[in-house]
Amino acid sequence: MKRPISQQSVQVALGQAALPVGVLTFNKDGARESSTFAYHEAWLRSADRFEISPDLQLVQGQQFRKAPSRDDSIFPFAFADTEPDGWGCRVIARDHARRRKSAQEKGRDVPHAGLTEMDYLLGVDDLSRIGALRLADEAGNYLRSIEDGGRGTPPLLELGHLIGATRAVEMNRETAADLKYLRGRGTSLGGMRPKCTILDEDGQLAIGKFPSINDDRSVTRGEVLALHLAAAAGITVAQSRIVMSEEIPVALVRRFDRVTNGGRIPYLSAGSMLQASRQEEHAYTQIADCIIARCADPKRDLEELWRRLVFNLLITNVDDHVQNHGFLHVEHGLWRLAPAFDINPFPDKDPELKLWLNEDYGPVDSIEAVMNEARYFRLSADEAKRILGEVRNAVGDWKRVAKSAPVGMTDDDLDAFQPAFENGQTEAAAALL
């Protein structure tokens, strides 16, 4: 028996001006899913053209993509970056299951049983989709648009409602109203922790990150502390602060892929820039190679990347994988490092980073080894020592910053996080200085 074959195409546009770029097509052949992309000829002729994804060359015709492993996306890398993260996928799947059940009970047409990769890709609201890529149907409607003319991104004053809905999902007690409220408002930047796209008080996009019911420490305050320490260490970071909602600390992190007039900046994760499979190990030196090949100011970004490497080790940020580093487009296919985001101290972990130092050394676990690799990042011994001193001094001030108004940690919080900031690596850094 021949397997059913289906296709679904969407128009791809770029930025707030919605410049037509090409067509993305989802293909389903039985259980097999794949995608193809073709640039519009007008984009290929444009003076402003660039490869929107490193695996999509500026050529005519269809470019095919299938996932090399179960963990990888079937879409070209730039599109995969805009897919919902683990939390967003959880909300979409729960909502789909509830819709099916409701339709069955009411005798209506039941949505198809299994969600496809395309369903998840199109499950993100157009306003909040990361970067500048926009997807539209044949009628020109941008996907996903909120139904019934509702507001796609809630304002800050709705934090209480958002927290209640996310906690209901965490406890498997969500209602149809909870899921309708959360649907499409997830993010692409993050993992399984509860979060939502939100409008800050001045109308700018931000990500609201909520405590989990399973937390044994104030993870949201820990992330804001890490971002403020990173800024003090000379690292470009996403703006952040703690916002209280009924005694619950929410981390509010501003989106860095938007400008004040609503403009959108193209974004690629470091994983996409590397064209990396999610099943492979990756190294800081590989990201450095991408910077040398693709960035507008390689020296600046190489120093910044090495500074982040030092900082991550000294604060025990062991979740520094390639999806937690990114790039913003500058012009004509040249990029720059995006501000640092999703930096978290892990006081209950050994200081061994997820990313490797290089392909021979393995995971980063020694500040001495990091110093020895500084030349790969085009830093002299004196420059490396200066940067180490700046980062070490910033991290050493962690208790004062933790008590500051934007973070607001208690004495109990300080005790919980101390092992992340005061450990063998920070002692070794002090000895090197």
Image (tube, grey):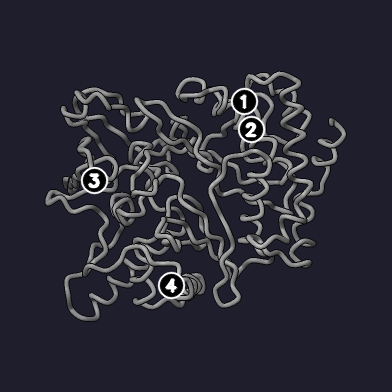
Q: Residue 28 shows which numbered tag?
A: 3
Q: Mark 1 vs mark 4: which is more N-terminal?
A: 4
The residue located at (25%, 47%) in the rendering is: 135
What quarter of the picture does the C terminus occupy? Answer: top right
Q: Mark 1 vs mark 3: which is more N-terminal?
A: 3
Real-space CA distance between mark 2 and mark 3, rounded to the nearest whole angstrom? 36 Å
- List the residue tagged with mark 4: 158
Report if residue 158 is visible in the image. yes
Query: Is disc 3 placed on a helix, strand or loop?
Result: strand
| Rendered position, 329 above or below 232 | above
Q: Nearer the viewer, residue 311 or 110?
A: 311
Is residue 299 found left or right of 275 in the rendered image? Answer: right
Q: CB of mark 4 within 8 Å of CB of mark 2? A: no
Q: Residue 356 shows which numbered tag?
A: 2
| Rendered position, 370 above or below 175 | above
The residue located at (40%, 64%) in the rendering is: 91
Question: In the rendering, at what x and y percent does residue 427 appear?
Answer: 85, 40
Dot 2 crowding, Cα within 10 Å, few <14, some 14–19, many 20+ = many
Q: Residue furthest bottom?
A: 106
Is residue 119 found left or right of 11 in the rendered image? Answer: right
Q: Nearer the viewer, mark 2 or mark 3?
A: 2
Question: In the rendering, at what x and y percent does residue 101 appear?
Answer: 29, 75
Real-space CA distance between mark 1 and mark 4, rounded to the nearest whole angstrom? 46 Å
Q: Looking at numbered disc 3 in the image, what kind of residue is underneath it?
A: Lys
Query: Is disc 1 placed on a helix, strand or loop?
Result: loop
Q: Looking at numbered disc 2 in the image, what kind of residue is underneath it?
A: Trp
Q: Nearer the viewer, mark 4 or mark 3?
A: 4
| Rendered position, 4 above or below 302 | below
- List the residue tagged with mark 1: 359
